[in-house]
Image: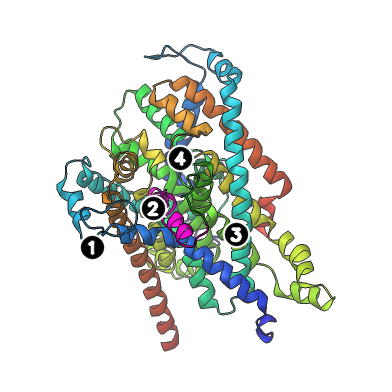
Amino acid sequence: MAQATQKRGVGFYLLAAFFALFVIFLYGPMLVIFVLSFQGPSGGLTFPMRGVSTHWFNDLWTSTRYGDLGGAFRRSVMLGAMSLLITAVVCLFAGLAFRKRFIGAGPLFYLAITSLVVPGILLGLGISQLFQMLGFRLHWWLSGLGAHLSWTLPFGLLIMFAVLNRFDSSWEEAARDAGASPWQTLRYVTVPILFPGLIAVALFGFTLSYDEMPRSLLTVGGRNTLPIEISNMTTNVTTPALYAIGTVTSVISFAVIALAFAGIALIQKRRARAKRGA
Amino acid sequence: MSRSSGRSSPLTPYLQVAPLALIMLAMVGVPLITVVLLSFWQSDGISIYPEFTWANYAQVLTSPVTLTLFLNTLKYAALTLVATILIGFTCSYFLVFHVRNLKWQIGLFLLCTIPFWTSNVIRMVSWIPFLGREGVFNQALISAGMIDQPLDILLYSDFAVVLTYIHLFTLFMIVPIFNSMAKINPNLIEAARDAGASGWQILWTVIVPLSRTGIALGSIFVVTLVMGDFFVVRVMSGGQSASVVSAMKNQIDQLFYPEAAAMAVLLIVVVLLMVSAILRIVDIRSELAK
């Protein structure tokens, strides 16, 4: 690199400062609500802290003011898990299909992109009205799941494209030439090589579903998911309990992200070691 | 290509893509058609009748509120777009051209993208203790002696709405701009420097034009996200301001589905026009294929 031979000028430090400010802008407010969620029992929505306690976390589980938070949480985790599995499997095969020419590839791709850019609530309106016209009842695990998939699948497909871009299909040919059946090739060659990418797709599948609100609003039927409960709380709840639920759900998101990153890093480390050993 | 045994049948891609195609048709294609149909149907506020009418469009298009809503939404979109392009470009520029260590580059890039996998609702809520009358911002300004009275315009205002949009959506700008910048051949910059170009000239004549695909893709994301939002505008403006979709949401809450659908179709037309305008300036497909 040419830059490596130059000294760092004022420009570098100005840009670094700008970047640091942006990161503070990105994470600062979140850190503030994490701190404020440990307010004492008489504390309010802003500083100063009136003591430090886990009062508002206990309040979430014990109080009946917040509706069915436990149930909403369970449904959101279930939906996330279902989205994870379906997104990973469906996008893997769709990604493989898009490597070849097939009729309808263009329209299908544009339909997926449309699903990304169309306002979520509008798609929710369409799904809920469609279900009503067909005489189906709205259920979180059916219409709700479908609405979530309309959000996770296009992202998964785009990630899959990026993953397959770097995949050398001569591995598959070699397997085929060695007499492997298509299933054996998939099971023992394609999937293991693509596995880190599939973890990334799965991460999108879970987190995008777990946090999805606009598409869920009209499609989950009578039983709410956690993001809907939280968004209702933003207008009804004026205690730090709002921050406590925010802290809980963010901790779960960060744990899932960390798990996915650790999984990818572990596989890559193992591969690097295998390569050195060979 | 399958030059071997011929076990891979021509039907394979169709079978592989069938689940995606089915879900996309059932959960995106048909529902969107449903919305369009709905916008031509009659309703009396209680039930909906599948009989053709232009009334919903007539109502939406003749109402003076519609224009105000669209202008207000476009104002939010424009302000957010300018801010996110400036921030996204600067951050990507720093990461690509000033961070030399690849590990640091990837690490800092991930730092910018991690919030994408967390809750937007919570990220929006997290501005409330910052911006309120008693919030961190006002307390800091007062203790610094810059103001005597707490500022009221910080929370529940257009300022709060746009700030939240910038906070939520800048990463949609950073990712594509970072991607196009990372593809710029360093030799091009070297050549420009050898030819006597100054730092600013290199920025304007080499880096900005070569980042245009990323800027265009990011703009499409940001514009559609802002135009599709109803929740941020409702909460962060304190109910004082409205956007197209937040007005649509009110109609849905009052069960005026056909009117809401007509508004939605109008919104989609406007958004499609804006996206195709962006695509006219930058041919994203051919640039991505490079």
| Mark 3 vs 4, N-terminal side | 4
Disc 4 to disc 1, C-alpha distance: 49 Å
* Prevalent SS, magenta region: helix
Q: Is residue B129 magenta?
A: yes
Please give the name of the residue rendered at 52% of the width and 44% of the height, measured from the top-left corner. B225
Residue linked to disc 4: B24
Please give the name of the residue rendered at 43% of the width and 69% of the height, measured from the top-left corner. A193
The residue carrying pointer 1 sits among few (fewer than 14), some (14 to 19) or many (20 or more) residues within 10 Å by Cα, namely: some
Residue linked to disc 3: B87
Marked residue chain, label 4:
B
Disc 2 to disc 4, C-alpha distance: 40 Å
Q: What kind of element bears circle 3?
A: helix
Q: Which mark is residue A52?
A: 1
Disc 1 to disc 2, C-alpha distance: 17 Å
Badges 1 and 2, same chain: no
How many circles with numbers are drawn on the protein? 4
Q: Is residue B251 above or below residue A121?
A: above
Q: What kind of element bears circle 4?
A: helix
In which image quadrant can residue B49 be found? Answer: top left
Marked residue chain, label 3:
B
Marked residue chain, label 1:
A
Residue bounds of the magenta highlight: B119-146
Can residue A201 be seen in the rendering of this structure? no
Type of amino acid at the residue the image marks with label 3: Ile
Disc 2 to disc 3, C-alpha distance: 24 Å
Please give the name of the residue rendered at 41% of the width and 26% of the height, measured from the top-left corner. B252
Q: Is residue B22 above or below residue A173?
A: above
Residue linked to disc 2: B129
| Residue B103 percent location from the top left of the image | 51, 77
